[in-house]
Image (cartoon, rainbow, N blue to C red):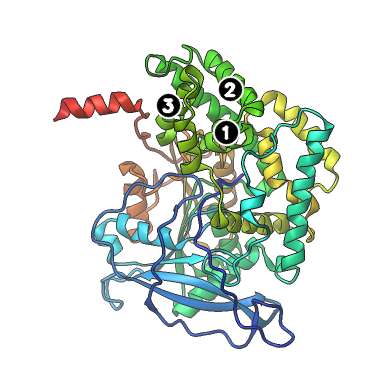
Amino acid sequence: MKRVVGVVAVAGMLAVTVGVPQGAVAQERDELVWGPCPDKPKTALFDGALTPPARAGEGEVECADLRVPLDYANPDQTISLALNRIKGKASRDHNHLGVLLVNPGGPGASGRNLAKYVATQLPDHLADRFDVIGFDPRGVGESEPALRCVDPAKYYAAPRPDHVPHNEREEAVLIGRARQYATACGNRWSWLLPHMSTENSARDMDAIREALGEPEISFLGYSYGSYLGAVYATLFPDRVKRLILDSVVDPRGVWYDANLSQDAAFDRRHQDFLKWTARHNDAYRLGGTGRAVSFAWYAMRERLRTRPAGGVVGPSELDDIYTVGGYSDVVWPQLAKAFSAYVKRGDTAPMLAAYRRHAENDAKAENGYAVYLGIQCRDAAWPRNWSQWRTDMSKLHVKAPFLAWPNAWYNAPCAFWPEKGGPPVRIQDSQELPPVMLVQSERDAATPYQGALQMRRLFSGSRLVTVPGGNHGVTLGGNRCVDRYLAAYLKDGSLPGPAERSLTGPDARCEGNPEPVPAARMAARADLSR
C-alpha cells in the first residue's frame, strides 16, 4: 500500500522515431548537461511521511535529463530520466565524499524534491562534501514518458464505491474498476510495461552513476526506496559507498504477501490512533477507551455509505484520509478534530479539509499510482484467480478491518495486469558490499518491523537503529539521535552500536519524538510560553 502523493508530471512526449514506440528514442545516450531547473510547484517528498520545513540556505539546484535504455538487453531504444543536483562546496580533490542519490519510495514518487530537502537537512560539514542527486524514476513526473492510464477526474470522482463490499454486486463493481484500470494501462503502454521493474530502476541508478563519472555512489532510500537500494546493492555491490535503508521493506514478501502484512500493521497503528484519541477525550469527546472510539469510527464509516460528508467523503475517501495517520502521528490532532466535528456536531468542514489536504487525487497522483502498479505488478507474481484474493481478504478483514479490503482494491489491478510478474530479484549479500545502515520505527505500518530484521539478516555487515512509535521515514525527520548515527556513517562509515552486532535485536536504539498533543492544547502551551 503506497499512500498516493503528488508527483510532478508533464504531458510532453519525446519525439517519435520510425519503428520505435512513442516515448522511446533510438539513439545514443545523452551526456549530462546541467542547467537551471524549470519553475515547478513544490510537491510532497516522502510516500507517507510528513515533511518538516527546510532550513534557509538551500544550495543552488541544477537539473539535467539522462537517456537510459528502455530495455537493458536491447539498449538502442531509450527513455529519459529527470535529474537534479545540489552540489557540495568542498573541493573534489580533498574533502569531497562523492554523490548521494536519494529516493522517497512509492514506487511512483519523485525524488527531486527529496534531494533538495536532504541537502538542506544534512549537517553543514556533510552537505558541503556531498553532491545530492535526485531523480524521477522511469515513468515518474518529469521523466519521459510519464505513465498515465486513465482520466483522474472520472476515475477518482468522489464519492467512490465503498472499498468494503457488502454483497456480490458491490464486489463486481470494484472488480470492474480494477480490470478497467489494468486494461487502460495495457492499451496505452504495451511497449513500456514489460520494462517497468525495480531491477530496471536499479540499472537506471547505475546509468546515473556512470553519467556522473563516479566509481561509487552513496544511496539513501525510504520505504520502497529501501527495496530499490537493496536491489542495487545486489546487482552492483562493488559500486556502493554508503547505503542507508530507512523504513525497510521485507524482501521475502514482494509484493502480495507484503500487502497482507501491511494490513495487520495498519490496523494496529489505526488502533494506536484511536487509543490516543481516547486518552484525549477531554478534547474530542469520542469515548474514554479505544474500544469506544473504535465503535464511533466504524459507525461514522457506515453512515457515510448513504450520507457522504459534503457529498464528497464516503467510506472509501474516509479510508484514504485516515490511512495517512498510519504513516505519521503528526496528523493525528487534525484527523481526530475532523472525526469529532463530524460525530459530535455534524460539521463536515474539517473532514472535507482533511480530504483535500491528504487524500484528493489528481493527475499527479494518478501518475504515481500508474507507476506503482507498473512496478509492483511486474516485479513479482500475483494471484490471477480472484477467489484467492476474496478468501484472503475475507479472513483478514475479520482481524484487521481497517485496511484489508481497501488495500486489496488498491492493488487489485495486478490480478488483471497485461504483463505477468516476476521473478523478483533475489536480494543477497556480497563480500564487495560495504556495511549497510538500517533505520526502522518499531510500529511502522507501511513497512513492518520484521522487514528490517530480515534485511539485516541478509546483509551480514548491516547495523539496525530502531525508534519506538510508528512514524514512517525516520532519518532527517527531527530525531537528533538517529541523525547523529547517520552523520557519522556518511562521514567515514562508522556503524551504529557496538563493534559486534546484535544477534537478535537492533544494534542501537534512539528515543522517539514526543507524541502529538491536541491542537487546542498546543496553542495554549504556546500562549503560556510567550
Type of amino acid at the residue the image marks with label 1:
Leu
- Mark 1 and mark 2 in contact? Answer it, CB < 8 Å: yes
Q: Residues within 10 Å of mark 3 (few under 14, many from 20)?
A: many
Quarter of the picture holding the C terminus: top left
Residue indicated by mark 2: 300
**Spatial distance from mark 3 to mark 1, Cα to Cα?**
14 Å
Category of crowding for the residue at label 2, using alpha-carbon neighbours closer than 10 angstroms: few (below 14), some (14–19), many (at least 20): some
Q: Which residue is mark 3?
A: 337
Residue 308 in sight in this render? yes
Residue 68 is left or right of residue 329, and the answer is right
The tag earlier along the polypeptide, 1 or 2, is 2
| Residue indicated by mark 1 | 318
> Residue 33 at x, y = what percent?
43, 83
Left or right, 424 with respect to 300, comes to: right
Measure how far apart labels 3 and 2 are at the Cα level.
14 Å
Q: Residue at x 79, y 36 (%)?
A: 171
Q: Residue at x 50, y 54 (%)?
A: 6
- Please name the amino acid that badge 2 sits on: Met
Q: Secondary structure at mark 1?
A: helix
Q: Quadrant of the N terminus?
A: top right
